Amino acid sequence: MSSVSSINSLLSSALGTSSTSSSGIDLSSLLQAATGATSAGIDVTSAVDAALYADRAPERQWQSEQSTISSQIAALTSLQTALSSVSNDLDSLNDLSGPLAARTVSSSATQVAGTAASGAAIGTHLVSVQSLATSASWYSPSLPSSSPSLGTSTLTVTAANGSQTSFDTGSGVNSLSDLASAINAAGIGVNASIVTDASGSRLALVSSTTGSAADFAVNYGATGAGTWSSASLSGSSTPLPASSFQLGDGASTVTINVNSGDTLSTVAGEINSSGLNLSATVVTDSSGAHLQIASTGSGSVSVSSDPTFNMTRASTAANASLTVDGIPITSATNTVTGAITGLTLNLTGTTPTNNPATLTVTSDTTQISQALSTFVSDYNSALSQVNSQFTYSTSSGSQGVLGSDSTVRSLQGALEGVVAYNSPASADSGSIQSLSDLGVTVNDDGSLSLDTSKLTSALADPSAVQNFLQGNALNGFAQQFSSEIDQFNDPATGAITNEISNLNQQYSDLQSQVNDYESGYIASQQTVLTAMYSQAEIALQQLPAEMQQIQSELGNNNNSN
């Protein structure tokens, strides 16, 4: 047997390869057996990763611990949120201006309604309304539209305190719309608008508030000018409303009476026959017909009001007048405060004589009932989260992530224990001594239920309910339970708060271990292994050529022999 055959046979026997191979050695099988690769050569990255996987076993243990810690933090944070809701409910029940202090007001008459502030005294009141607060209003005669000329006059608004504001027309303020805009822009407590109907357009002035202090008077006329013109009408024959005005020439004054149906021509004739040094004519132009008066001497024209635009009072601003529990009251508005402490009265009409409205102030049982219902719901939610940690799961084969947590176990006992609270013997809580007296009962699983019918009966004695929940000097059930929860949930010192902080530190410490292990050991191992496998890869790639050379040399020696 040749040397080559002997070597091939030996390698075949050692490596399990066939001696009939042309090279004598199956290198692909050799490399696959050595590296697990599916082709000749070494996948250095895969080989290094496979080697490092075993080295990272401690990391995987630390990361598993981190995963457990994360689950515990999430469960505790969720429990914190649930407990915060319960705390908020208790704070509301312990608030002197909260649901227990809410009041509702009923009235025997539609003319008087009322609302009550928190803590208003419970009781009944008699309210008689003699008159409502009103606003002042004035209106002008109808003009053909909102745009005809207003003439050369001055509209003067006199407030109840005597202050006056004047608006000159005929120069820039030429129409009803211009005048309304000027009045609104002045901010004098008078709202101006244009009312348009079948008869034409009118200026309407209404005080922005009610009450006698909001009253005002209006005059539209002029004094001291050499000529004067009235507002324009659609024509000289347009009938005028009945009115009267004072007309002067600087020396004398007369009263000009206008009868209903008179025209501008009628008024002009009356003026011209008055004996004053004045001349009146009717002028018709593009804006319509207007009365024009001019002085015939050295005097001036003085007109107290415009016969075509004589403002008429529609209402006088006045205070509301009422009697509350026999005490006479006046109010500038129909929303009356201060007559009854804590109550606001809303007046919409007068009450019949000798038949006052009866206002009854009671506890707002709807708000109290809702507050207790919310408390029961939030308590059940928190207790359910706690209990779920100690419930064995057949699917996972274990309890919750907090199943061995002593803090959560203590919290469970605190929740179940506090609901058994009874008022101390020294507390004057009347007929309400426990939650069950309010209709709150404990179910077999520790959760609570609210019997609204029993609660409604208990609320018939609101002071007893308040004494139980708030106690003397706010030391009742709500405060006692809130203090228990604070031991666990206080944002600074609570047991759960501290535990979450500790778990976060543990998580951080584990992460530091992972980071240090990666940088201190895995990184160096990766460098060493990468170099080793790279050299092996190079050697394996060179092996076929070296084997061929060896076989060639062996073959040559055999031939020479």
Image (cartoon, helix red, strand yellow):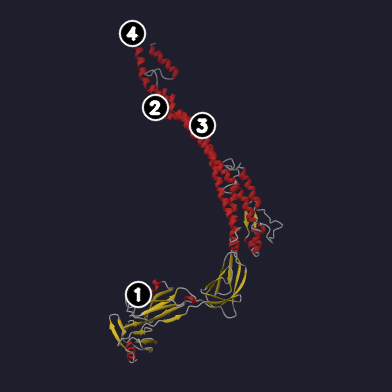
Q: Which of marks 2 and 3 is in front?
A: 3
* Residue 356 in view: yes
Please, what is the three-letter code of the amino acid marked with disc 1?
Asp
Above or below, 328 against 433 in this view is below
Q: Answer yes or no: do the residues labelled 1 and 2 have beta carbons within 8 Å?
A: no
Tell me the distance, in whole angstroms, between the alpha carbons under discs 2 and 3: 29 Å
Q: Which residue is drawn at 33% across and 8% down?
A: 560
- Which residue is labeled 1 in the image? 178
Q: Which of marks 1 and 4 is nearer the N terminus?
A: 1
Q: Mark 4 points at which residue?
A: 560
User: Is label 4 in a helix, a strand or a loop?
Assistant: helix
Question: Which of the two discs, 2 and 3, labels the residue nearer the N terminus?
Answer: 2
How many marks on residues? 4
**Quarter-wise, where is residue 220 in the image?**
bottom left
Badge 1 vs badge 3, beta-carbon distance below 8 Å: no
For mark 2, what is the residue? 39
